Amino acid sequence: MEMSAHSATVPVLDAPVEERGEFLRRVGSWTVGGLAFTALMGIVSAMYIAPAVFQGGRWAVIAVVYGSFLLAQTVARKMVYGTNKVAGFVLGTAMQGVALGFLLLITVLMTRVDQGLLLIGQCLLLTLTTALGMLCAVYMSRSSMSFLRPALAMLTLPMLLIMVLQLVFPIGGTLGLIISVVFVIVSAIGLLYRLNHVVREMDTTMAVEGAYEITLSIVVLFWNLLSLMNRRRR
């Protein structure tokens, strides 16, 4: 289908129904593909990369995990919004998977393997269900959430740093549980904002960019939810 000039400047909700539907289908396809690739890289990381890095000590883990998150949030994102969209998308989702593999490995090793895999599956289902529910709410609502942008921009990197540090230097007791709950809430708000941003502020030519933002936000929510569930098992 040939894109009109209208679609290059008008937000998705104000675009013609055909363009809106096509945009959402493309975003959905890229997001599913990105999540699948992240999951694949997470499995590879849990089986091969994370065990080797753990042997190098805690600081090696921090360097690899935080470096992976940082690459996905900065370098890869710039590529996605530039001229190397596909390469940036692949790089960013791969790096998210590499980081995620460390948490997956810890989850499986904490108790029996089958219990760890079951918990991962439950958190994944809850995360995807939450994302779909938020998408429906954003699509049907006309309210803007742009007021959340400054707070989320300010919290992103510190939150990622604490997420990584807690992987190897876990904070125990009530304080650790409170931090985990707060992180789940903040990452859920972040996902809601990203969905709102994609639907309201992007135009219908930005399917890759929209999918990238949604994919990263879903992975961060999954990470924090799984971390919370792990803490409850200790």
Image (cartoon, helix red, strand yellow):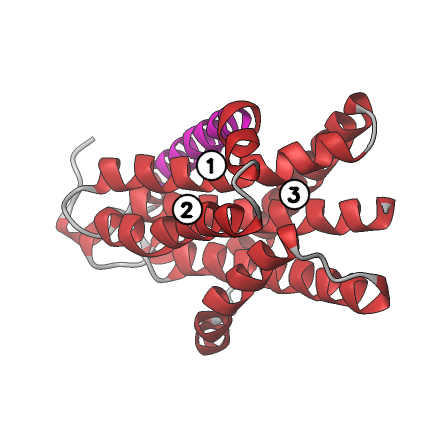
Q: CB of mark 3 within 8 Å of CB of mark 2?
A: no
Q: Position of residue 85 (x, y in %)?
A: 22, 42
- In reply to whether residue 32 is colored magenta, the answer given is yes
Residue neighbourhood size for the residue with mark 1, other residues' Cα within 10 Å, grouped as few (<14), some (14–19), many (≥20): many
Q: In this rendered view, identify the residue nearer to me: 112 or 118.
A: 112
Seen at 78% across and 35% down, the residue is: 110
Percent position (x, y) of residue 90?
Answer: 32, 34
Q: Is residue 92 magenta?
A: no
Q: Amino acid at mark 1?
A: Val
Query: Which residue bears the numbered disc 1?
Result: 98
Q: Which stretch did the figure color magenta?
A: 22-45
Across and down, in percent, residue 80 comes to 26, 47
- Comparing 189 with 216, the one in front is 216
Answer with left or right where residue 203 lies relative to residue 67.
left
Please determine whether, in this image, residue 103 is positioned above or below residue 148. above
Dominant SS in magenta: helix
Are there few (<14), some (14-19), or many (20+) residues within 10 Å of tag 3? many
Using residue 214 as the reference point, say whether residue 124 is left or right of it.
right
**Residue 34 in view (yes/no):** yes
Question: The residue tagged with tag 2: helix, strand or loop?
Answer: helix
Q: Which label sits on residue 127?
A: 3
Q: Can the viewer see residue 144 in this picture? A: no
- Looking at the rendered image, the disc whose residue lies closer to the viewer, 3 or 2, is 2
Q: CA distance from mark 2 to mark 1?
A: 7 Å
- Judged from the image, the secondary structure of the residue bearing numbered disc 3 is helix
